[in-house]
Amino acid sequence: EAVEYWCGEDTAATTRRTTLTNVLTDLFLSTSGDQWTINGNWGDADVCFCSWDLVDCITDPTFVSLPLSDNHLNGTIPISLGNEDFFRSLDFSHNHINGSIPENFNKLIQLRSLNLSGNHLIGKIPMLNNLKSIQNISLDSNNLGGYMEDSMFSCEGCTINLLNNTFWCPLPSFCDDTNAFCSPCVEAPECEGISRCACEKDSSCCTATWPSDSCIETAEAEKCYCSHDITFWTVFSVMAAIVFVIVAAVFAGGCIIYFVNKRGDVS
């Protein structure tokens, strides 16, 4: 049934297969797939992805699960992964994934399990309140931080593991549930040299006296900027403008005097 649904020759199967093949190829390329421990057939468009190693089309024939735990994934999660609601389970735990969790994961309403634990993910957890049928969310042991909202999750009875991250006080009410596991919160830091919105995306920015290149990139991507840079470039720009005006004035004044003298000589 799974083979026919995904790998059949009818128009619907071909469309599904083409779409998901592109998404899986994005994942392969963005996480250094050629260096994965197990990667047989991945990226081979001539082979239906149900025959790619670690792609599970059998457990639930009309959905796909990706049990890629401890497989040396190194890179970022592509945004395209959240654009297609074809996934039942995503397990990328215990790898070397960095960057942030895509906000469009909130579209994966058929997802039953999301395990991203044991990676190097940064920033705030996006809203996942559309995943009402999910049973397990494991985001523990990352570098996630910032504020969490009470409405971030809306799955009834699901298990939520957020341990070993650094979230800011106060913690949301769902952390009091028996199925939720949250580390003690910390006070929101006074960000040094970088604006608060960048700190929420990359908590390492908040400990840097002078922001690193990655922090600056985060700030620019979020349309907020490092105050050190703003101060320096603002002062530099103002000083440059003043110097330019002075030089222009001196030059213009010199020209006027020169032409006046010239006219006097001619007279």
Image: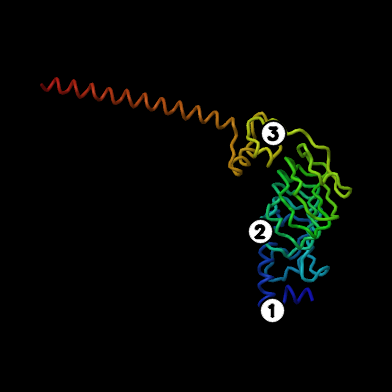
Read off the residue under disc 2.
80
Mark 3 surroundings within 10 Å by alpha-carbon count, few (fewer than 14), some (14 through 19), many (20 or more): many
Measuring 86% from the left and 47% from the top, which residue is drawn there?
177
> Which residue type does callout 1 highlight?
Glu
Residue, far bottom: 10
Q: Nearer the viewer, residue 54 or 208?
A: 208
Read off the residue under disc 1.
9
Measuring 66% from the left and 30% from the top, which residue is drawn there?
192
Q: Secondary structure at mark 2?
A: helix
Q: Earlier in the sequence, mark 3 or mark 2?
A: 2
Read off the residue under disc 3.
206
The picture quadrant where one finds residue 11 is: bottom right
Q: Secondary structure at mark 3?
A: helix
The picture quadrant where one finds residue 231 is: top right
> Which residue type does callout 3 highlight?
Cys
Is residue 88 toward the left or the right of residue 221 in the image?
A: right
Q: Is mark 2 in CB contact (under 8 Å) with mark 1? A: no
Query: Disc 3 and disc 2: Cα gap in Å?
Result: 30 Å
Relative image position of residue 203 (x, y in whole percent): 71, 38
Query: Disc 1 and disc 3: Cα gap in Å?
Result: 54 Å
Is residue 170 toward the left or the right of residue 30 in the image?
A: right
Relative image position of residue 172 (x, y in whole percent): 79, 43
> Which residue type does callout 2 highlight?
Ser
Q: Is mark 1 in CB contact (under 8 Å) with mark 3? A: no
Q: Nearer the viewer, residue 53 or 203?
A: 203
Q: Nearer the viewer, residue 227 or 254?
A: 227
The quadrant of the picture occupied by the C terminus is top left
Measuring 83% from the left and 40% from the top, which residue is drawn there?
183
Q: Earlier in the sequence, mark 1 or mark 3?
A: 1
Measuring 60% from the left and 34% from the top, which residue is drawn there?
226
